[in-house]
Amino acid sequence: MRDMALQFYNAWVANMGQPRPKKLVCKWHVDKAWLVELKVKIGDTGLEAEVYKMLPMVLEQTSTRLFQDCVGALLAKLSADLKMKEFHDYFVQDWLQNKEIWAYCYRIGLGKNTNIFTEAFHRLFKRLYLGGKVNKRVDSCLVNLLKFARDQCFGRVIQLTKGKANYRITQIEKRH
């Protein structure tokens, strides 16, 4: 599971060798890339909203037949208006050719559909510790990461003191 940049995948393959791992792209990065390109290529917020409602439906289909149907409906919508022609071409060229790395229907049986824990951490960290702002300074990011780690440790101590364990901890304790 990775972001859109290929350097991490290429470094992994160069160091680990064969067999090549299957590439998967994080849903968050796909969504972010689509939002950026919608604004750049369409420019009309009403049309952007209509198209954006369809994109997650295409992404999250777990059946290849339904995926093809949703893609067909999306492409029909995009080709119906000249304002959406540029996004149509972008989607066909950059995304449909690589659908195996982002569409859920091609991830069946891989054991991983998302990096949900990483996404949850990112959302929590950005909203609570960075105040919803983009961080540009390493020192302030490190300070906030230390605050996050401190809060997680205190939360864990409180949880252990109260004696409430989640399902995973309960299962570990049963095995030991």
Image (cartoon, rainbow, N blue to C red):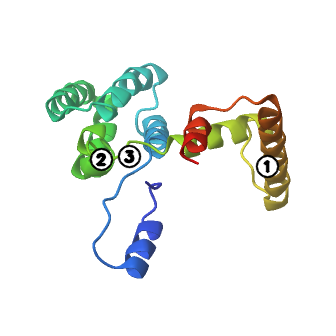
Q: Residue 112 has which mark?
A: 3
Label whose residue precedes the other's in the sequence (1 or 2): 2
Q: What's the residue at 32%, 65% (across, down)? A: 21
Label whose residue precedes the other's in the sequence (3 or 1): 3
Furthest-left residue in this view: 65
Amino acid beneath label 2: Trp
Label whose residue precedes the other's in the sequence (3 or 2): 2
Spatial CA distance of label 3 from label 2 is 20 Å
Residue 78, quarter of the rendered image: top left
For residue 130, say whether it is visible.
no
Residue 41, quarter of the rendered image: top left
Give the labeled residue for mark 1.
149
Give the labeled residue for mark 2.
95
Q: Residues within 10 Å of mark 3 (few under 14, many from 20)?
A: few
22 in relation to 159, above or below: below
88 in relation to 146, above or below: above
Amino acid beneath label 3: Lys
**Pointer 3 with pointer 2, Cβ within 8 A:** no
Q: What's the residue at 37%, 75% (across, down)? A: 13
Secondary structure at badge 2 equals helix
Q: Residue 32 has which mark?
A: none
- Residue 80 spot, x, y in % from top left: 22, 24
Spatial CA distance of label 1 from label 2 is 37 Å
114 in relation to 77, above or below: below
Secondary structure at badge 1 equals helix
Q: Choose between 57 and 79: the one closer to the eye.
A: 57
Viewport quadrant of the N terminus: bottom left
Amino acid beneath label 1: Ala
Lateral position of residue 158 relative to residue 38, left or right:
right
